[in-house]
Image (cartoon, rainbow, N blue to C red):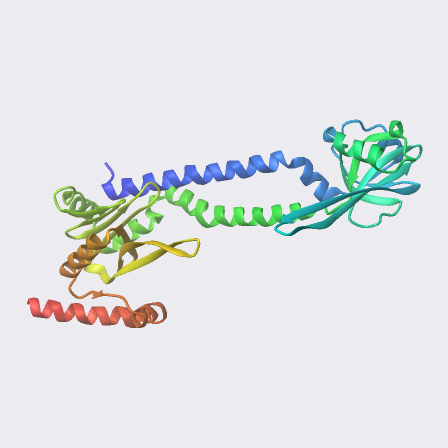
Amino acid sequence: MEPWIVQMCREKSRRRVIAWASVLGVGVLALIFNARYIVNFIGGPYSLPADELVRITDPGSTLRYFVTVHGEKVINTGVKEVSTSVFKGGQDTTYISSYYALMVKDRILIIKTDALPGTTITGELGALPDYLRIRVFLEGHAGLAENRCLPLYLNAEDFRTRGYFGMATGLIWIALLLGFGLPAWLRFRDVSRHPVIRRCQKWGDIGAISSAVEREFPGAIRYNCHGHTLTDNFIVVNTFFTFNLLRFQDLLWAYRRITTRYVYFLPAGKTHAAILICYGGAGTFMASEPLVLEILRFASTRAPWAIVGYSKQLADLFRKQQNTFCQTVEARRQQVLKRAA
Protein backbone atom coordinates (compact mmCIF):
# COMPACT_ATOMS: atom_id res chain seq x y z
CA MET A 1 0.00 0.00 0.00
CA GLU A 2 1.27 3.46 -0.91
CA PRO A 3 2.31 5.83 1.91
CA TRP A 4 -0.28 8.43 2.86
CA ILE A 5 1.81 11.27 1.44
CA VAL A 6 2.01 9.54 -1.96
CA GLN A 7 -1.74 8.90 -1.91
CA MET A 8 -2.47 12.55 -1.20
CA CYS A 9 -0.14 13.79 -3.95
CA ARG A 10 -1.70 11.39 -6.44
CA GLU A 11 -5.26 12.37 -5.49
CA LYS A 12 -4.59 16.12 -5.80
CA SER A 13 -2.89 15.56 -9.16
CA ARG A 14 -5.90 13.54 -10.33
CA ARG A 15 -8.29 16.33 -9.34
CA ARG A 16 -6.16 18.90 -11.15
CA VAL A 17 -6.07 16.74 -14.27
CA ILE A 18 -9.87 16.50 -14.24
CA ALA A 19 -10.20 20.26 -13.77
CA TRP A 20 -7.76 21.13 -16.56
CA ALA A 21 -9.29 18.49 -18.82
CA SER A 22 -12.59 20.33 -18.32
CA VAL A 23 -10.88 23.59 -19.28
CA LEU A 24 -9.50 21.87 -22.37
CA GLY A 25 -12.96 20.56 -23.21
CA VAL A 26 -14.53 24.01 -22.86
CA GLY A 27 -11.87 25.44 -25.17
CA VAL A 28 -12.45 22.74 -27.78
CA LEU A 29 -16.21 23.31 -27.62
CA ALA A 30 -15.61 27.05 -28.08
CA LEU A 31 -13.54 26.32 -31.18
CA ILE A 32 -16.24 24.02 -32.57
CA PHE A 33 -18.98 26.55 -31.78
CA ASN A 34 -17.02 29.30 -33.57
CA ALA A 35 -15.75 27.12 -36.43
CA ARG A 36 -17.76 29.09 -39.02
CA TYR A 37 -16.26 32.37 -37.86
CA ILE A 38 -12.75 30.87 -37.79
CA VAL A 39 -13.12 29.67 -41.38
CA ASN A 40 -14.15 33.15 -42.50
CA PHE A 41 -11.50 34.87 -40.37
CA ILE A 42 -8.74 32.79 -41.95
CA GLY A 43 -10.06 32.42 -45.50
CA GLY A 44 -12.08 35.59 -45.99
CA PRO A 45 -13.08 37.94 -47.31
CA TYR A 46 -14.56 35.85 -50.12
CA SER A 47 -15.60 37.42 -53.41
CA LEU A 48 -19.38 37.06 -53.72
CA PRO A 49 -20.79 37.46 -57.26
CA ALA A 50 -24.15 39.21 -57.62
CA ASP A 51 -25.84 36.05 -58.92
CA GLU A 52 -24.90 34.15 -55.75
CA LEU A 53 -25.78 37.08 -53.50
CA VAL A 54 -29.37 37.36 -54.70
CA ARG A 55 -29.91 33.62 -54.14
CA ILE A 56 -29.05 33.83 -50.42
CA THR A 57 -32.16 33.81 -48.24
CA ASP A 58 -30.63 32.78 -44.93
CA PRO A 59 -27.14 34.18 -44.26
CA GLY A 60 -26.97 32.18 -41.02
CA SER A 61 -26.70 28.94 -43.01
CA THR A 62 -24.12 30.30 -45.46
CA LEU A 63 -20.61 29.00 -44.72
CA ARG A 64 -18.89 31.99 -46.32
CA TYR A 65 -20.37 35.15 -44.86
CA PHE A 66 -17.32 37.43 -44.67
CA VAL A 67 -17.51 38.63 -48.26
CA THR A 68 -16.70 41.33 -50.77
CA VAL A 69 -19.69 42.54 -52.80
CA HIS A 70 -19.55 44.57 -56.03
CA GLY A 71 -22.47 46.87 -56.86
CA GLU A 72 -23.31 49.61 -59.32
CA LYS A 73 -24.50 52.46 -57.15
CA VAL A 74 -24.58 53.56 -53.49
CA ILE A 75 -27.53 55.52 -52.04
CA ASN A 76 -27.56 57.14 -48.62
CA THR A 77 -30.77 56.05 -46.90
CA GLY A 78 -30.49 58.84 -44.34
CA VAL A 79 -30.81 56.37 -41.46
CA LYS A 80 -28.13 56.68 -38.80
CA GLU A 81 -27.30 54.73 -35.67
CA VAL A 82 -26.51 56.94 -32.69
CA SER A 83 -25.87 56.51 -28.98
CA THR A 84 -27.57 58.93 -26.60
CA SER A 85 -26.40 59.49 -23.04
CA VAL A 86 -28.82 61.32 -20.77
CA PHE A 87 -27.43 63.25 -17.83
CA LYS A 88 -28.64 65.95 -15.50
CA GLY A 89 -29.08 69.13 -17.48
CA GLY A 90 -29.13 67.61 -20.96
CA GLN A 91 -28.02 64.73 -23.15
CA ASP A 92 -25.11 63.80 -25.38
CA THR A 93 -25.56 62.10 -28.77
CA THR A 94 -22.71 60.17 -30.39
CA TYR A 95 -22.77 59.10 -34.03
CA ILE A 96 -21.99 55.40 -34.51
CA SER A 97 -22.75 54.39 -38.10
CA SER A 98 -24.94 55.01 -41.15
CA TYR A 99 -26.98 52.80 -43.44
CA TYR A 100 -26.62 52.87 -47.22
CA ALA A 101 -28.32 51.04 -50.06
CA LEU A 102 -26.02 49.27 -52.55
CA MET A 103 -27.65 48.57 -55.90
CA VAL A 104 -26.65 45.07 -57.01
CA LYS A 105 -28.19 44.53 -60.45
CA ASP A 106 -31.87 45.25 -59.79
CA ARG A 107 -31.75 44.41 -56.06
CA ILE A 108 -30.96 46.46 -52.96
CA LEU A 109 -28.43 45.41 -50.32
CA ILE A 110 -28.46 47.45 -47.11
CA ILE A 111 -24.96 48.38 -45.91
CA LYS A 112 -23.99 49.35 -42.35
CA THR A 113 -20.77 51.34 -42.18
CA ASP A 114 -19.12 54.17 -40.27
CA ALA A 115 -17.59 55.68 -43.44
CA LEU A 116 -18.83 56.62 -46.90
CA PRO A 117 -18.70 53.34 -48.90
CA GLY A 118 -17.74 52.76 -52.49
CA THR A 119 -19.39 50.33 -54.88
CA THR A 120 -17.09 47.52 -53.74
CA ILE A 121 -17.70 46.74 -50.06
CA THR A 122 -16.34 44.12 -47.68
CA GLY A 123 -18.21 43.02 -44.60
CA GLU A 124 -20.22 40.43 -42.72
CA LEU A 125 -23.55 39.21 -44.08
CA GLY A 126 -26.45 39.03 -41.64
CA ALA A 127 -30.22 38.74 -41.70
CA LEU A 128 -31.92 42.12 -42.16
CA PRO A 129 -33.78 42.92 -38.92
CA ASP A 130 -37.42 43.98 -39.21
CA TYR A 131 -36.80 47.20 -37.27
CA LEU A 132 -34.05 48.18 -39.71
CA ARG A 133 -36.24 47.42 -42.73
CA ILE A 134 -38.97 49.64 -41.28
CA ARG A 135 -36.56 52.49 -40.59
CA VAL A 136 -34.95 52.35 -44.06
CA PHE A 137 -38.13 52.14 -46.12
CA LEU A 138 -40.57 54.10 -43.98
CA GLU A 139 -38.35 56.70 -42.31
CA GLY A 140 -35.43 56.82 -44.73
CA HIS A 141 -35.01 57.35 -48.45
CA ALA A 142 -38.35 57.69 -50.18
CA GLY A 143 -37.10 56.47 -53.56
CA LEU A 144 -36.18 52.95 -52.46
CA ALA A 145 -38.54 50.09 -53.34
CA GLU A 146 -38.96 47.71 -50.45
CA ASN A 147 -39.90 44.77 -52.69
CA ARG A 148 -36.46 44.93 -54.32
CA CYS A 149 -34.60 44.70 -51.02
CA LEU A 150 -32.64 41.54 -50.22
CA PRO A 151 -33.51 39.83 -46.88
CA LEU A 152 -30.00 40.49 -45.59
CA TYR A 153 -27.58 43.32 -44.93
CA LEU A 154 -23.82 43.77 -44.96
CA ASN A 155 -22.07 45.02 -41.84
CA ALA A 156 -18.96 46.71 -43.23
CA GLU A 157 -17.58 47.57 -39.81
CA ASP A 158 -14.56 45.73 -38.42
CA PHE A 159 -14.92 41.94 -38.67
CA ARG A 160 -11.60 40.67 -37.37
CA THR A 161 -11.29 42.49 -34.00
CA ARG A 162 -13.13 39.78 -32.08
CA GLY A 163 -10.96 37.23 -33.87
CA TYR A 164 -7.79 38.90 -32.61
CA PHE A 165 -9.32 39.02 -29.14
CA GLY A 166 -10.12 35.32 -29.46
CA MET A 167 -6.54 34.60 -30.51
CA ALA A 168 -5.22 36.44 -27.45
CA THR A 169 -7.62 34.49 -25.24
CA GLY A 170 -6.54 31.27 -26.93
CA LEU A 171 -2.87 32.00 -26.28
CA ILE A 172 -3.66 32.58 -22.60
CA TRP A 173 -5.68 29.35 -22.59
CA ILE A 174 -2.78 27.39 -24.12
CA ALA A 175 -0.30 28.98 -21.68
CA LEU A 176 -2.47 27.96 -18.72
CA LEU A 177 -2.80 24.42 -20.03
CA LEU A 178 0.95 24.11 -20.54
CA GLY A 179 1.80 25.87 -17.28
CA PHE A 180 -0.66 24.09 -15.00
CA GLY A 181 -2.48 21.31 -16.87
CA LEU A 182 0.58 19.57 -18.30
CA PRO A 183 2.49 19.45 -14.96
CA ALA A 184 -0.63 18.02 -13.30
CA TRP A 185 -0.84 15.32 -15.98
CA LEU A 186 2.86 14.47 -15.67
CA ARG A 187 2.59 14.26 -11.86
CA PHE A 188 -0.49 12.07 -12.13
CA ARG A 189 1.34 9.65 -14.43
CA ASP A 190 4.51 9.76 -12.34
CA VAL A 191 3.79 10.89 -8.79
CA SER A 192 7.52 11.06 -8.02
CA ARG A 193 7.54 14.34 -9.98
CA HIS A 194 5.39 15.99 -7.31
CA PRO A 195 7.41 18.63 -5.38
CA VAL A 196 6.21 17.25 -2.03
CA ILE A 197 7.51 13.77 -2.93
CA ARG A 198 10.84 15.21 -4.01
CA ARG A 199 11.12 17.26 -0.82
CA CYS A 200 10.26 14.27 1.38
CA GLN A 201 12.84 12.12 -0.40
CA LYS A 202 15.49 14.61 0.71
CA TRP A 203 14.29 14.24 4.30
CA GLY A 204 14.63 10.46 4.32
CA ASP A 205 12.40 7.44 3.84
CA ILE A 206 9.04 8.65 2.61
CA GLY A 207 7.19 5.78 4.27
CA ALA A 208 8.64 6.66 7.67
CA ILE A 209 7.89 10.36 7.17
CA SER A 210 4.34 9.55 6.15
CA SER A 211 3.86 7.42 9.25
CA ALA A 212 5.22 10.24 11.43
CA VAL A 213 2.74 12.72 9.94
CA GLU A 214 -0.16 10.29 10.32
CA ARG A 215 0.72 9.67 13.97
CA GLU A 216 0.21 13.37 14.65
CA PHE A 217 -3.36 13.21 13.29
CA PRO A 218 -5.54 13.93 15.22
CA GLY A 219 -3.79 13.78 18.60
CA ALA A 220 -1.07 16.39 17.94
CA ILE A 221 -3.07 18.88 15.87
CA ARG A 222 -2.60 22.35 17.35
CA TYR A 223 -4.39 24.55 14.81
CA ASN A 224 -6.55 23.86 11.79
CA CYS A 225 -7.62 26.76 9.53
CA HIS A 226 -9.29 26.18 6.15
CA GLY A 227 -7.24 23.13 5.21
CA HIS A 228 -4.00 24.45 6.75
CA THR A 229 -3.03 22.33 9.75
CA LEU A 230 -0.29 22.72 12.35
CA THR A 231 0.88 19.70 14.32
CA ASP A 232 3.76 19.49 16.74
CA ASN A 233 6.27 18.98 13.94
CA PHE A 234 4.59 19.60 10.60
CA ILE A 235 2.72 22.20 8.56
CA VAL A 236 0.17 20.45 6.35
CA VAL A 237 -1.75 22.16 3.55
CA ASN A 238 -4.60 19.94 2.39
CA THR A 239 -7.22 21.66 0.22
CA PHE A 240 -9.29 20.34 -2.66
CA PHE A 241 -6.58 20.85 -5.28
CA THR A 242 -3.46 21.33 -3.16
CA PHE A 243 -1.34 19.20 -0.87
CA ASN A 244 1.84 20.47 0.73
CA LEU A 245 3.95 19.31 3.63
CA LEU A 246 6.53 21.36 5.51
CA ARG A 247 8.49 20.82 8.72
CA PHE A 248 8.88 23.18 11.64
CA GLN A 249 12.57 22.36 11.71
CA ASP A 250 12.78 24.03 8.27
CA LEU A 251 10.95 27.20 9.37
CA LEU A 252 12.76 30.38 8.32
CA TRP A 253 10.36 33.25 8.85
CA ALA A 254 6.96 33.77 10.46
CA TYR A 255 4.97 36.97 10.41
CA ARG A 256 1.48 38.40 10.53
CA ARG A 257 -0.12 39.82 7.39
CA ILE A 258 -2.95 42.33 7.74
CA THR A 259 -5.07 43.14 4.70
CA THR A 260 -7.56 46.02 4.72
CA ARG A 261 -10.67 45.52 2.60
CA TYR A 262 -12.26 48.51 0.87
CA VAL A 263 -15.80 49.01 -0.43
CA TYR A 264 -16.20 52.06 -2.65
CA PHE A 265 -12.80 53.29 -1.41
CA LEU A 266 -13.94 53.12 2.21
CA PRO A 267 -12.35 50.71 4.75
CA ALA A 268 -14.64 47.73 5.31
CA GLY A 269 -12.68 45.58 7.73
CA LYS A 270 -9.39 43.73 7.97
CA THR A 271 -8.28 40.14 7.46
CA HIS A 272 -5.43 38.56 9.39
CA ALA A 273 -3.12 35.74 8.36
CA ALA A 274 -0.10 33.99 9.82
CA ILE A 275 2.55 33.38 7.14
CA LEU A 276 5.00 30.56 7.86
CA ILE A 277 7.86 30.40 5.33
CA CYS A 278 10.03 27.30 5.26
CA TYR A 279 12.60 25.76 3.00
CA GLY A 280 10.55 24.62 0.01
CA GLY A 281 7.32 26.51 0.58
CA ALA A 282 5.00 28.47 2.83
CA GLY A 283 1.77 28.05 4.77
CA THR A 284 -0.88 30.75 5.08
CA PHE A 285 -3.27 30.57 8.04
CA MET A 286 -6.27 32.90 7.69
CA ALA A 287 -7.83 33.41 11.10
CA SER A 288 -8.93 35.96 13.66
CA GLU A 289 -6.28 38.30 15.04
CA PRO A 290 -5.95 36.52 18.41
CA LEU A 291 -5.62 33.12 16.71
CA VAL A 292 -3.03 34.45 14.27
CA LEU A 293 -0.97 35.79 17.17
CA GLU A 294 -1.31 32.45 18.96
CA ILE A 295 -0.12 30.59 15.84
CA LEU A 296 2.95 32.83 15.62
CA ARG A 297 3.71 32.22 19.30
CA PHE A 298 3.39 28.49 18.79
CA ALA A 299 5.66 28.63 15.73
CA SER A 300 8.28 30.55 17.68
CA THR A 301 8.34 27.82 20.36
CA ARG A 302 8.62 25.00 17.79
CA ALA A 303 11.35 26.82 15.82
CA PRO A 304 13.00 29.35 18.14
CA TRP A 305 15.69 30.07 15.56
CA ALA A 306 13.18 31.37 13.01
CA ILE A 307 12.75 35.10 12.49
CA VAL A 308 9.35 36.23 13.78
CA GLY A 309 7.85 39.55 12.71
CA TYR A 310 7.66 41.63 9.57
CA SER A 311 9.56 44.66 8.36
CA LYS A 312 10.32 46.09 4.95
CA GLN A 313 14.01 45.44 5.50
CA LEU A 314 13.36 41.76 6.18
CA ALA A 315 11.10 41.51 3.12
CA ASP A 316 13.71 43.16 0.90
CA LEU A 317 16.44 40.89 2.26
CA PHE A 318 14.35 37.76 1.68
CA ARG A 319 13.40 38.86 -1.83
CA LYS A 320 16.78 40.12 -3.00
CA GLN A 321 19.27 38.12 -0.91
CA GLN A 322 17.52 34.92 0.06
CA ASN A 323 20.79 33.03 0.58
CA THR A 324 21.94 35.63 3.11
CA PHE A 325 18.55 35.42 4.86
CA CYS A 326 18.81 31.62 5.09
CA GLN A 327 22.41 31.80 6.33
CA THR A 328 21.33 34.17 9.10
CA VAL A 329 18.56 31.79 10.19
CA GLU A 330 20.95 28.84 10.02
CA ALA A 331 23.41 30.67 12.30
CA ARG A 332 20.57 31.29 14.77
CA ARG A 333 19.66 27.58 14.58
CA GLN A 334 23.20 26.53 15.45
CA GLN A 335 23.21 28.88 18.43
CA VAL A 336 19.90 27.45 19.69
CA LEU A 337 21.14 23.86 19.28
CA LYS A 338 24.40 24.71 21.03
CA ARG A 339 22.55 26.19 24.01
CA ALA A 340 20.24 23.16 24.13
CA ALA A 341 23.23 20.82 24.20
Residue 73 drawn at (x, y percent)? 92, 42
In-image side of 71 versus 12 (left or right): right
* Residue 129 visible in the current orientation: no
In-image side of 136 versus 163 (left or right): right
The vertical placement of 212 against 338, above or below, is above
Residue 27, quarter of the rendered image: top right
Query: What residue is rendered at 17% in x and 55% in y?
Result: 294
Q: Quadrant of the C terminus?
A: bottom left
Residue 300 drawn at (x, y percent)? 16, 61
The vertical placement of 258 against 315, above or below, is above
The vertical placement of 54 against 215, above or below, is above
The vertical placement of 6 against 291, above or below, is above
Judge by depth and name the residue closer to the eye, 242 or 140: 140
Q: Quadrant of the N terminus?
A: top left
Judge by depth and name the residue closer to the eye, 27 or 190: 27
Judge by depth and name the residue closer to the eye, 121 or 232: 121
* Residue 239 visible in the current orientation: yes
Marks counted in the figure total 0
Residue 13 drawn at (x, y percent)? 36, 42
Query: What residue is rendered at 35% in x and 42% in y?
Result: 241
Determine the residue located farthest toward the front in the rendered image.
Answer: 89
Query: What residue is rendered at 37% in x and 38% in y?
Result: 14
Residue 334 drawn at (x, y percent)? 15, 69
Determine the residue located farthest toward the left in the rendered image.
Answer: 341
In-image side of 270 versus 129 (left or right): left
Residue 227, quarter of the rendered image: top left
